Image (cartoon, rainbow, N blue to C red):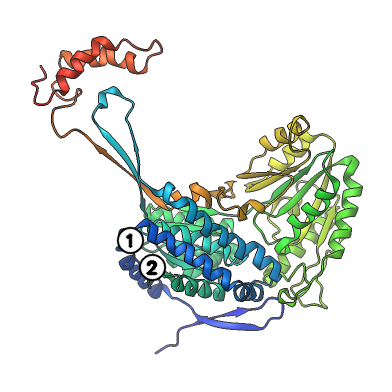
Amino acid sequence: MMAASTLASINPATGETLGTVPVAGARRVAQAISDVRSVQAHWPQVSLDERVQIARRFARILLARRDDMALTISREAGKPLAEAMLADVLPSLDYARFLATDARALLTPRRRRFRNPLLVGHRSEVQHRPMGVVAAITPWNYPLAIPVAAVLPAIVAGNGVVLKPSEETPLVANQLLSLLHEAGMPEGLVEVVQGAGPAGAAVAGGDVDGILFTGSVPTGQKVAAAASRRLVPCCLELGGKDPAIVLKNANRERVASGILWAAMTNAGQTCASVERAFVPAADHDSLVKAWVEGARQLRLGEGESGAVDMGPVINDAAVKRIIDHVRDAERHGATVVAGGAVRDDLGPRFVEPTVLTNVATDMRCMREETFGPTLPVMAYDAPDDAVAWANDSPFGLTASVWGPGGGRKGIATRDIAARLDAGTVTINDHIYTYGATETPWGGVKASGLGSSHGAAGLLELTRLRHTATAPARGRDAWWYPYDRDVDVVLAKGLPWLYGRRGLRGAALLPALRRRTRPGGPGR
Ligand code: ADP
């Protein structure tokens, strides 16, 4: 028998192999989907409270094991331990708490009255039913937080999940699965299938009832095509080219450290990192100076080694793409004022924090997602130009404005924020709402479809079912025959119900009553 192929997990800082996992071929993926389906069939009958209990217990166990989990994340994805804790463990705990506090209210069926008096005696209830088996295809940059944001709400909503984590971070996904089992999740409700693109394609094209995908635009398009072939919903969290607009009276210190962090955190490998900064011409030089100093002070090194601000980027292809963007910018007239090279002394995947000036809106570093530790800075004369440049992008994930936030002084800041085309706009900060999981997260334009997080993200994992109940006896006013009573309903009723003049109902009600009287002849 041919040995199943395996996938090696590599530490990007050292090149060391951390472990290997078997790759799931198309048959294994199909089997996993069908196995999850048979377990999921019983899951919605388990009470919502019990399902939420899994999220609560998961949080307790993750909290207890956070150091161990952060270490695996740091080794596999290369990030500093502090970032593994802040940007993977913390949002996962936060998501579990959000579900513990809000899922019951959000998933409870909602009754409402029909407003239309023709429907007197009818009842309406909207239920949030599970989709069934959800495919979650996730990337490596937040190898815990992103899968948790898919798997946890999915199972609380009553679904089963087939998780296809990134081929760069298979071990974190396996560790997540064992924490879920420890938290009491039924065996087989979530299965992890490992592998690269072909495994992802098999999951997306398999017999699933919905797809959650986080990754690049080209792959997102393939996933959307697979979803459309089977007519199942898909939620896509794709890339970004996020702008930060600094206004002239912004707090300089906050801008200097906040935008540096938002551009460089996770070595810039964040879909919502700042990838373009627009600053007032008068403040350009002093801000650039602050960012250059800040970039030079960042300590690069192996994530798990303690006093480190930035780890390596994920792989050689990432190094090439980032350096290509920098060289392309230089060729077209940009100036590299900090960084711009690989720190070979540390290893082949350590890219220096890089600040670029004299950039132009048509350069690759200003149009394509760099997904690396670069901060291109452009000066503007009029804030309207900054808004136009910021919106001139195929992406629309997040955007930020930095200036006075509250009261009268904040009017201009809020006005600019309102004009930005993005799924999330932050004032005087960037990225952080991913960790505030009660709020929605999702992009516009090429940045994606649908939402994760918050009420919208949870309900995205359900299908609505409306159950409407009519009285068991009598007949409705609009049923056959279309006689005088129906004429009265239409002639008087429609203007009464929907016209601007309002009530003229008296003439309508006797006819209505006649027609809805139990057992009445209606004519
Ligand atoms: P990244 O550049 O972040 O790796 P990708 O979009 O390539 O972005 O990958 C995101 C996830 O999508 C990963 O889990 C990857 O294995 C998976 N993937 C890659 N190709 C496909 C595909 N054709 N269909 C479904 N999933 C895929």
Q: Which residue is mark 1?
A: 46
What residue sits 36% from the left and 18% below the top?
Answer: 498
- Does 379 sit left or right of 440 as displayed? right
Figure quadrant of the C terminus: top left
Residue 482 makes an appearance in the image:
no
What residue sits 13% from the left and 28% below the top?
Answer: 474
Q: Does 237 sit above or below residue 518?
A: below
Seen from the viewer's position, the closer of residues 237 and 101 is 101
Residue 495 makes an appearance in the image:
yes
Figure quadrant of the N terminus: bottom left
Residue 137, position in %: x, y?
Answer: 50, 63
State the CA–CA distance, disc 2 to disc 1.
12 Å
Seen from the viewer's position, the closer of residues 493 and 365 is 493
Query: What is the tally of numbered marks visible in this picture?
Result: 2
Q: Earlier in the sequence, mark 2 or mark 1?
A: 1
**Judging from the image, what secondary structure is the residue with disc 1 in?**
loop
Residue 503, position in %: x, y?
Answer: 34, 12
Q: Residues within 10 Å of mark 1 (few under 14, many from 20)?
A: few
Q: Does 142 sit above or below residue 504?
A: below
Q: Residues within 10 Å of mark 2 (few under 14, many from 20)?
A: many
Question: Marks 1 and 2: in contact by CB < 8 Å?
Answer: no
Closest to the camera, between mark 2 and mark 1, is 1
Q: Which residue is mark 2?
A: 189
> Given the image, on which type of amino acid does mark 1 rest?
Val
Residue 517, position in %: x, y?
Answer: 14, 23
Seen from the viewer's position, the closer of residues 144 and 98 is 98
Q: Does 398 sit above or below residue 494?
A: below
> Given the image, on which type of amino acid does mark 2 rest?
Leu
Seen from the viewer's position, the closer of residues 323 and 75 is 75
